[in-house]
Image (cartoon, rainbow, N blue to C red):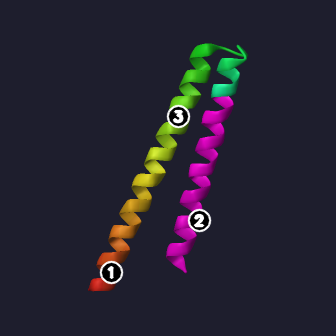
Amino acid sequence: MKTNVRFLRRGLVIFMGLILVAVSIIQIVNNEGQLWLNVIFAGLGVFEIVLAIFMMRLDIKTSKENLNS
């Protein structure tokens, strides 16, 4: 059960990162706001997604090791 909650949290973080990237791209296309700020937010969204995926892989690895021992 504890692992499922972790994956749910990571999935939520990935979803929020996707929303952040999508909003930044829409604002860049529509020329709304400052370009550099939108690029920074898009980069933060991508970083958030990559970090969440890395943490999910780490959780899978540790849960497999715990099952084997």
**Residue 41 higher or lower than 6, as above or below:** above
Please give left or right for residue 36 compared with residue 63 in the image.
right
- Seen at 45% across and 53% down, the residue is 53
Which residue is depicted at the point 55% across and 73% down? 4
On the image, numbered disc 1 is attached to which residue? 66
Q: SS for tag 2?
A: helix
x and y percentages locating residue 58 in the rendered image: 36, 62
Quarter in which the N terminus is drawn:
bottom right
Q: Which residues are magenta?
A: 1-24
* Mark 2 neighbour class, 10 Å CA radius: few under 14, some 14 to 19, many 20 or more: few
Magenta stretch: residue 19 in it? yes
User: Which quarter of the image is occupied by the C terminus?
Assistant: bottom left
The percent position of residue 12, horizontal first and vertical second, equals 62, 56
Amino acid identity at mark 3: Leu
- Answer with left or right where residue 26 lies relative to residue 42: right
Question: Considering depth in this image, is 48 or 23 the residue closer to the camera?
Answer: 23
- The amino acid pointed to by label 2 is Leu
Q: Earlier in the sequence, mark 2 or mark 1?
A: 2
Q: Which residue is mark 2?
A: 8
> Can you say whether 43 is above or below 27 in the image?
below
Q: Residues within 10 Å of mark 1 (few under 14, many from 20)?
A: few
Whether residue 20 appears in magenta in the rendering, the answer is: yes
Q: Which residue is painted at 53% across and 67% down in the image?
A: 6
Q: Residue at x 65, y 14 (%)?
A: 34
Q: Which residue is mark 3?
A: 44
Q: CA distance from mark 2 to mark 1?
A: 20 Å
Instruction: Determine the main secondary structure of the stretch shown in magenta.
Output: helix
